[in-house]
Amino acid sequence: MSRVYNFSAGPAVLPEDVLKEAAAEMLDYQGTGMSVMEMSHRSKAFQSIIDEAEKDLRELMEIPDNYKVLFLQGGASQQFAMIPMNLFKNKVGDYIITGQWAKKAWQEAKLYGKANAVASSADKTFSYIPDCSDLPIDEDADYVYICQNNTIYGTVYHELPNTKGKTLVADVSSCFLSEPIDVSKYGVVYGGVQKNVGPAGVVIVIIREDLITEDVLPGTPTMLRYKTHADAGSLYNTPPCYGIYICGKVFKWLKAKGGLTAMKEQNEKKAKLLYDFLDQSKLFKGTVEKKDRSLMNVPFVTGDEELDALFVKEAKAAGLENLKGHRTVGGMRASIYNAMPIEGVEKLVAFMKDFEEEHGK
Ligand SMILES: *Cc1c(COP(=O)(O)O)cnc(C)c1O
């Protein structure tokens, strides 16, 4: 068996310890004689798995008691609809457009009411986070929406927008559990777990209780109401059981590593290795404004498409996989999520140095 360093943006690298544990429990989960995949979601064993996952997540993120934690399906993209369907009262949402994911959420919201783009960084290919200190927030806005870490472009909000008292809703898919956040500043925090937390198929929604109401848009399907899932403890119907189980293991792994403060330190260390190299390189160049750089997704280019393609190919041959940039940006992107060991980033930087020596002008 040989494992590669996997820089995929998602689905992405998971902690090896977690995979090994899951493998060891595959045929017989803790004396039940069956795999978690084969188990009733109404069983005692599964109830403890989901309860413990929630408890550990609450501990890791210090989630206040007046927030619910929901384990749902449909990916992050389904939240693009669930948010307006459940939160629209005046049918107005203010969106900050910092990339494809924010844009998709904004476009989806337009199906249900008035969705304003109150700021955007589209003018410079989403290479920065706009100034959000004094936005033209709509008086009637039900919420202000952000995509906190922009997976494709490699930017992150280092400071949350001034929402002028409106509820903040954030897609944290690609920075979930990468560092501590103050949940109380948000109305809704949600993320698809396949970037930084677990296998595809689970989306975690952390939502303040007063936002969970029966007062949803007419026609909102039962399955798309937060209340349905909140009332049933995420067990209204069969949840993504195996995915929740793996997320639970990742939460335990994070706790054992020292929690989110320790994770942040480690992530800063890894990102610094890569950014410091990019900043002095004559061949490679980062593509986003320094002040808005993501700790998780690092896009870079050589400026020569053929050379970029050669880099991706040779890196793969060296055991550094999935470094090709998103199709809309080109170049390269290294996603260095929690589970990417620092050795992987060191190896990438060493490889980039060698490549530059060979191909630099
Ligand atoms: C990947 C991603 C999505 C889409 O996730 P799906 O689970 O595929 O719907 C949405 N937002 C962000 C920030 C992402 O990185």
Image (cartoon, rainbow, N blue to C red):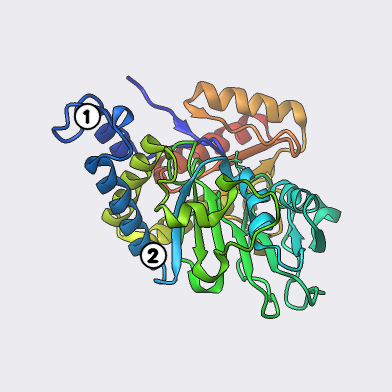
Query: Which amino acid is tagged 1?
Result: Ala
Which residue bears the numbered disc 1? Answer: 24
* Label 1 vs 2, first from the N-terminus: 1
For the C terminus, which image quadrant?
Answer: top right
Q: Could you tell me residue 230's position as x and y percent?
A: 46, 57
Residue type at numbered disc 2? Thr
Q: Residues within 10 Å of mark 2 (few under 14, many from 20)?
A: some
Residue 334: x, y in percent? Answer: 57, 41
State how far apart marks 1 and 2 are (Cα). Answer: 29 Å
Q: Quadrant of ligand 1?
A: top right
* Residue 269 visible (yes or no): no
Instruction: Pick out the residue farthest to the left.
Output: 31
296 or 185, which is in the foreground?
185
Q: Quadrant of residue 42?
A: top left
Mark in front: 1 vs 2: 1
Q: Nearer the viewer, residue 62 or 128?
A: 62
Q: Which residue is mark 2?
A: 261
- State whether residue 228 appears in this view: yes
Q: Residue at x 38, y 26 (%)?
A: 3
Horizontal side, residue 253 vs residue 266: left or right: left
Q: Quadrant of the N terminus?
A: top left
Q: 343 above or below 305?
A: below
Direction right: furthest residue: 123
